[in-house]
Image (cartoon, rainbow, N blue to C red):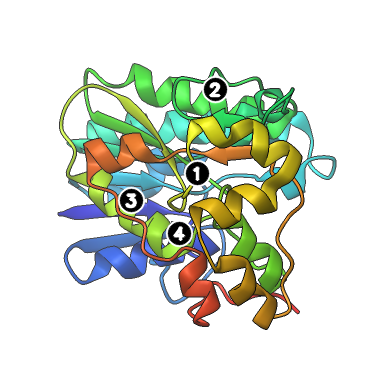
Amino acid sequence: MRIVVTGAAGLIGSAIVDRLAGEHAVVGVDLRAASQVDIVANCTDAAEWGRRIGALDAIVHVAALHAPHVGHRSDEEFRLANVEGTERLIDFGISAGAKAFVFTSTTSIYGNALEPNDRAAWIDEQVAPRPRDIYDETKLEAEELVASAGSSLTCTSLRMSRCFPEPAELMATYRLYRGVDRRDVAEAHALALDRKGPPATYVISAATPFHREDAEELLHSAPTAIERRCPGLIDRMAVKGWTPPRSIDRIYDASLAEHELGFRPRFGIEACLSGDWDPPPSR
């Protein structure tokens, strides 16, 4: 396939380009130059730079303003980048003959729904997003645009969980319930490109060992639930100097992506314990 990947210079976009490049003809697009970038341009100008590409089979849209930009960039800039940029790319994809559009979304759009009450919040695709800032709002609006293009393209939105360099202990622990390795994110995008059918949305996160019935215990006594579901894990974490969380407030459930996409995340906490990190932990 001939595939355009936007945000190709970024943490996630570059991983997606690397994953796809061995099997497909990939055209990387980003605002900044990098080894994975073929066209330095803005997504809002897709009609212009798209003429240089010609026909294509799919678009993977990763580029966006993100949560760290909140408070530093205006609401108008967020809407231009995240909403209008997505709309322009959809139009370009349809005009170029693309058959698939994969949108990199975020679990952040669940917003206030992530807050626990008497138990940890169990987050899957059935939970209604409750955006709490302009980032959440614009990513959800972009998802809606993608879904509305489903009559012309096979459209898939992937709500990826937390994935950036943090202290090792934090990254490893998050893989139990709210984090993901970028290599698994890239694989999810590759699988989504082969999907057929109506518009769909999936949570993409590392596989959690927990069950829904653990939610109350996770909030009030997380080590007890961890030891029951993962015997010996706390001792192995202690060898690294890592302490298990006292409370877990949410669990991201990627089982629908497993069932419908064949998504099998490989880089959970066990990979972290063995030193297999990507991205590497911050220090």
Q: Which element is circle 4 on?
A: helix
Mark in the foreground, 3 or 4: 3
Q: Amino acid at mark 2?
A: Glu
Nearer-N-terminus badge (1/2) = 2
Q: Earlier in the sequence, mark 3 or mark 2?
A: 2
1 or 4: tag closer to the N-terminus:
4
Q: CA distance from mark 3 to mark 4?
A: 12 Å
Residue 80 visible, this orientation: no
Q: Nearer the viewer, mark 3 or mark 2?
A: 3
The percent coordinates of residue 267 (x first, y second) are: 43, 66
Which sits earlier in the primary sequence, circle 2 or circle 4?
A: 4
Question: Which dot marks residue 141?
Answer: 2
User: Which residue is under mark 1?
Assistant: 210
- Lower sequence index among marks 3 and 4: 4
Which x, y percent locates residue 29?
43, 57
Point out the tag, 1 or 3, that comes first from the N-terminus. 3
* Residue where numbered disc 4 is placed: 13
- At label 3, which amino acid type do we have? Ala
Q: CA distance from mark 3 to mark 2?
A: 22 Å
Q: Quadrant of the C terminus?
A: bottom right
Q: Is residue 192 left or right of residue 113?
A: left
Mark 1 or 3: the one toward you:
1
Left or right for 231, reference 119: left
Quarter the N terminus occupies: bottom left
The residue that appears at 75% across and 49% down in the rendered structure is 68
Q: Which residue is mark 3?
A: 188
* Residue most extreme to the right: 71
Depicted 193 relative to depicted 114: above or below: below
